[in-house]
Amino acid sequence: MEGWLYGIFTLSGVLVGGLFTYLGLREQLKQQKDANTIEWRRKVRSEPLLKLRNELAVIAAKSDKVVYVSREYQKSIDTPGEEKAKKEQQDVLHDWHIYAGSGILRQIILIQYDKELVKKVNEVVEHYVESYDATTRGEELAVKTWPIVIEVQELINKRLEEL
């Protein structure tokens, strides 16, 4: 009879151990699933922000060049360098129109989920348009766009840190 008793205790020990192993694996899989879900959400949310951050740098660089070249052209009117400056302005504007016509920025803005960011990016674009318009009229625009660009970049970085 003692042999049966050892067998029953051994079998019950194996069953209890198996149960705890099963429960442990189940909990571990649940934690892994939660971690994967969080990582997936972070990736899905950060991708549009990273694209916007990069595209904002592109638009700022291109827009600065348009404004700078246009300002230089306005300064060169009625000087020997006018034709060269005019050609450079036309080339830069052509490059800008190709970029703007590509719709890349619009596409990146449309995948954003943060209305405040979209509003700020549109504000940056509007400032560059105003700067260009003022330059073509021979005026210097007192408003500088770089502080707004930096503000938007900081806001994007803040959103990325929150993820």
Image (cartoon, rainbow, N blue to C red):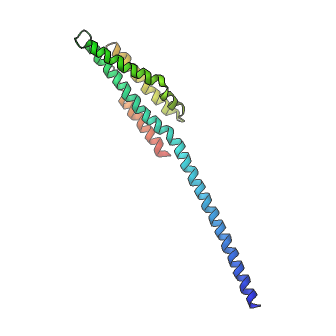
Which residue is located at x 64 percent, y 69 percent? 21
* Residue lying furthest left: 80
Residue 116 seen in the figure: yes
Name the side, left or right, on which 149 lies relative to 33.
left
Which x, y percent locates residue 62? 37, 26
* Residue lying furthest top: 78
Question: Residue 55 sits in which quadrant?
Answer: top left
Relative height, residue 8 to residue 90 (above, below): below
Which residue is located at x 60 percent, y 62 percent? 28
Relative height, residue 90 to residue 50 (above, below): above
Which residue is located at x 31 percent, y 20 percent? 69
Which x, y percent locates residue 11? 71, 79
The mark total stands at: 0
* Residue lying furthest bottom: 1
* Residue lying furthest right: 1
Q: Quadrant of the N terminus?
A: bottom right
Nearer to us in this view, 79 or 24: 79
Name the side, left or right, on which 19 lies relative to 95.
right
Which x, y percent locates residue 49? 48, 38
Which residue is located at x 45 percent, y 38 percent? 156
Which x, y percent locates residue 51? 47, 36
Nearer to us in this view, 109 or 104: 104
Residue 139 seen in the figure: no
